[in-house]
Amino acid sequence: MEAGLRVFDRYGEREKRMKARMKFLVQKLGVATFMELVETERLAIKNKAVAVDWQDAKWLEVPVVNIAPKVEPIDEQRYQTWVKTNVFPQKQAGYVGVQLRVVLGNIHAEEARVLASLVSACAADDIRFTLNQGILLRFVRPESLPYLFNELIKLGLAEPGFDTIADITACPGSDTCALAVTNSTGLAKKLEDVIRTDYPELVAETNIKIKISGCMNSCGQHMAANIGFHGSSIKKGNLVVPAMQIVLGGGIDPSGKGFIAEKIIKIPTKRVPQAVSVLLDDYETQQQNGEYFNDYFYRLGEKHFYNLLKPLAAVDNLEATDLFDWGQDYQYRQEIGVGECAAVMLDVVGMIVQDAQNKVSFAEEAIKAGIFADGIYHAYTAFVVGAKAMLLSKDVKCNTQKGIIDDFQKHYIETGDFGWSLVFSEHVLRINQNEPTEDFANSYLKDANDFVKNVIAIRSAQLNATNGVDKQVIADYYKA
Ligand code: SF4
């Protein structure tokens, strides 16, 4: 894993944040090349294998849990449904796991505190967050369930239907994410209403999952859904209509086999509830002997679903409401920003040089503490960050670490502007040619330190030439 992360760090996209993901690097390099690079990095990693003593694994122990007071469920019918859809027997006899639906994954701090004390009262004292934005309580005694249910009702966390079609996963979308194209949470709420009202018989259906992302980035896991959506837009003349790309056939089938969804068609987001109804009605009439949703999808083929949904994609019959996204009372306009994971707003070359100095300090500390592999990696980062500062001072755009290393050769070593004559990539990438020993760590750190000192000296000379005015770089030359 560590070697894989180092490969991503060195070759991964930095400028286009939409593509700054491992999957795009693997696609660009191909799996074989990616794995070759991972193997090359192994030498530099301290822990090449870690033995796990399963006998010593604390999490295998059955914890001591309290039994909650004996009570009757407040609502017997709802309790029975909740037990059916949210509770499962654990492998350890005499215990059940309890899954909590947390709508859109949102929980307030006050509720979380009450939940924590409830967990102490009748479950193991650790909880798990689940992939579908829910919570899993472990080691609950069956006799504690009525009490737990009653208390969860007060917290709004006793909603039946965990991981069913009505338990929709959605990323924050345009509520908070600046990369979002559309509102995913508003649509999720609307679809849950549609399913509960129009398809009550399906509320406990666990073989169809709906997942929504506000853009193609998949934080809402839409490609792993039987019915998935990601935010998009459709242009019609001067109008921009908020839209959703529909994908079908993803997820994990009952035998555990995984599927990546297929793109079908893009429709205005206000028509998505209708699209879900069309799909569920078609599934009801066309499925054979209770066939799994994906089997029905792959049997009928993409074309069938494209034709089925095509009428909803037409934009010659737009209504005024189609121009408003879910939960918004103003006409839709696209405003895509830097995104939640991109906090950098402003940078100057001097700050980046400072960053390189900090990396050298981190390297010194780690090596002093005997953590040589980490120290070497901090020193490596000092080389890269220092080179980046130098390149940006010459208006050379920066993206991947490998690009920075190669460009430094071209713009500083070959021009003689750095005063060093060596092959910069060989000098820096010795990191993956050596075991992380103390000797190598000290010699590599010394080289990184010398490099950063030279960067500081050259930057001082550059600043003298501009009367001390530093260069602002974030907007045009450096988005990484
Ligand atoms: S970046 Fe992630 S969280 Fe933001 S809208 Fe896209 S999918 Fe959702």
Image: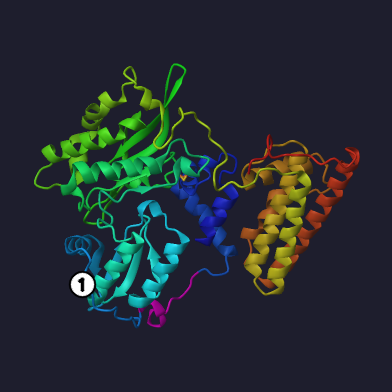
Pointer 1: what residue? 72
Residue 98 appears in the figure? yes
Q: Is residue 341 above or below residue 135?
A: above
In the rendered structure, the answer to whether residue 159 lies left or right of residue 344 reads left
Picture residue at 63% right of the left edge, 47% below the top: 401
29 or 369, which lies in front? 369
356 or 37, which lies in front? 356
Position of the C terminus by quadrant: top right
Picture residue at 70% right of the left edge, 67% below the top: 441
For this orientation, the residue located farthest to the left is 289
Extent of the magenta region: 49-60
| 391 inside magenta stretch | no
Circle 1: element type: loop
- Residue 214: horizontal and vertical position, in percent? 43, 40
Quarter of the image where one finds residue 272: top left
In the rendered structure, the answer to whether residue 328 lies left or right of residue 71 reads right
Residue 294 appears in the figure? no
